[in-house]
Amino acid sequence: MNVLIKTRTVVNCLYNSLLKVNNISPSTHRHSSIRQLQFDNVQQTQEVELLTSLTKEVIDRCRERRWKIGIAESCTGGLVSGSLTALAGSSDVVDCGFLTYSNDAKIRLLGVPSELLASVGAVSHEVALSMADGVLNKVPAVHLAVSITGIAGPGGGSDTKPVGLVYFGLACRGYKTLSSKHIFSGDRTTMSVDDHCEFLLPELPPNTKPLEHQVAGHFYGLSKTKFGLLQRSNGDVLKPLLNPPRGPREYRFYVDVFQNTSSSSYSEQDLLNIRNFLPKYLGTYEFKNMTYLILENIIQPFELPCIADIKIGRITYDPEADLDKIERQAKKFPPAAEVGFQLLGWKTYRQREQVYEYHDKHCGRTLDKDELIHAIAHFYGATTILRRDVIKQVLNRLLDLELIMDKQRTLLLFASSLLIVYDGKQSIEPHTDVRLVDFAHVFPNKKHDENDENFLFGIRNYINYLILLLDENYVYIPVTKIEHHPKKFSCYKQSSHISDETLTDTYNSHGYTENV
Ligand SMILES: O=P(O)(O)O[C@@H]1[C@@H](OP(=O)(O)O)[C@H](OP(=O)(O)O)[C@H](O)[C@H](OP(=O)(O)O)[C@H]1OP(=O)(O)O
Ligand SMILES: Nc1ncnc2c1ncn2[C@@H]1O[C@H](COP(=O)(O)OP(=O)(O)O)[C@@H](O)[C@H]1O
């Protein structure tokens, strides 16, 4: 097995993980060359150059964050540590390397459970995870740990674990530990790397980065497809089109609303009325076989944006959903049948401590009906001071939207969200915005004499909650599930693209707090 390629892959994993946890855009030029080379058969010299450039990138990124790296190696026998330390000046970043070639060394030095080794074997996802976690457990100074365990050959392979099979582990404090499987094959000069690597990210279009302040939906690098919302340097949002029929449906809807096409299935007046509630549609953009919608960034005018994504509707699947989808959606948040909405994510600014606090859909879905009102109050600042001035403005806008939706007869909005934004900065006049987003499940209403009862039920209920909050007698009761697990970020540096899985994990086990 070509050790150089193995080493590069480890370093590449480290590099991608840094982008993931730091919301850092890679330098596009270098990134594209990395991508290009990644699955090609390349010459050793190119490999060395690539390895050097990746290594430098990793070291530089960690240095920026003042992070220390720890490495746990098995089959590479110290090569990864070697390539990282070969770089002049890496000593302030590389903390330690464990060469744990034998099972016994993995147990002794990294605390890998012997039962685990006995049950799944040293070359496995589980052991890679345990090795990476072991580094963090053993060395408090280390922030980011990578592990590698594999079958180097020429002997030692089997049908289920062939020569060339390698697992990588990647552990970062406060985040879920990930593992990745690679099968390396070929001879020393002709190598192929299978692309089953969780850490590889789609190439970012020039001058873009993952969307700042995103609170729900597909996060870049972390959704199933790894594609997610981005922002351009001028702030415009790029939303990747989901697979058909969803993506094209959403695209069609934006075009109908903003270009008022006569062929539309919806009434022209209905589209015109709702237009004011959508982010402006600014066209499409193509990059590397992906089409993006270009949308107005509605967060941009805010200094300290506090954002909530509220999915509206008792039913969040469309008329074409199959039974599986219906079942999955219905199970996610059973109270939705009663309240008609769900909190998919909210980010709020805590005046006193001057930090952001973020809660995701997993948190939203743990709430019961009685807790919901306090969770909503939490978004409007209840932990410090309930922003009734903000609530009043939001309420007025929601009432306008409700009126439009009550009058219209041609639209059915399934699984769309209200995006509510206000400025966490204390000012004399509250600054707010309310929009609708996510139109992957918009359908024409075949019954022209009916409105969208499913949507109206949800928005009216949310409105009712806001009215309750305006009542002087309302008293905020902290919800343990929310208060005990805050994810806090200092004002401007929210790491906004953390995976659903990662968030669940941090939420459940760590109560992650980061002040970068
Ligand atoms: O559970 P699933 O499989 O229905 O996944 C949902 C997605 O459905 P899909 O897999 O594309 O059919 C679903 O996509 P759609 O909205 O149905 O296009 C959402 O992304 C949903 O996330 P959330 O409930 O909006 O936070 C996704 O839910 P999560 O699994 O992320 O909770
Ligand atoms: N136009 C926009 N401006 C600013 N943020 C946006 C905009 N559209 C979406 N977002 C952010 O992205 C998240 C997901 O958006 P959504 O359209 O629902 O994407 P998805 O289809 O991936 O679920 C929202 O919760 C919000 O945080």
Image: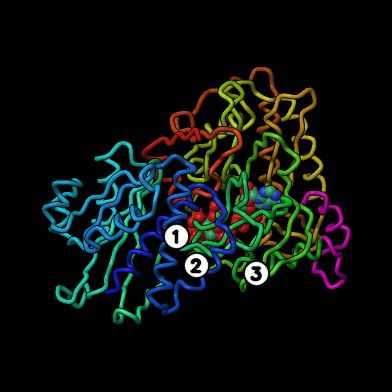
Q: For ligand 2, tell me if the residue under mark 2 lies within 8 Å.
A: no
Residue 243: x %, y % from top left: 59, 70
Secondary structure beneath dot 1 equals helix
Q: Which mark is residue 118?
A: none
Q: Earlier in the sequence, mark 2 or mark 3?
A: 2
Colouring convention used in this rendered image of the protein:
rainbow
Q: Which mark is residue 287?
A: 3
Which residue is depicted at the point 71% across and 48% down? Answer: 456
**Residue 76 figure quarter:** bottom left
Q: How many marks?
A: 3
Q: Amino acid at mark 3?
A: Phe
Residue 82: x %, y % from top left: 29, 57
Secondary structure beneath dot 3 equals strand
Q: Amino acid at mark 1?
A: Leu
Q: Which mark is residue 54?
A: 1
**Residue 284 figure quarter:** bottom right
Magenta residues span 258-278
Question: On the image, numbered disc 2 is attached to which residue?
Answer: 34
Which residue is depicted at the point 35% across and 62% down? Answer: 180
- Whether pointer 1 and pointer 2 mark residues with C-beta atoms closer than 8 Å, the reply is yes
Tell whether 6 sits left or right of 63: left
Q: CA distance from mark 3 to mark 1?
A: 24 Å
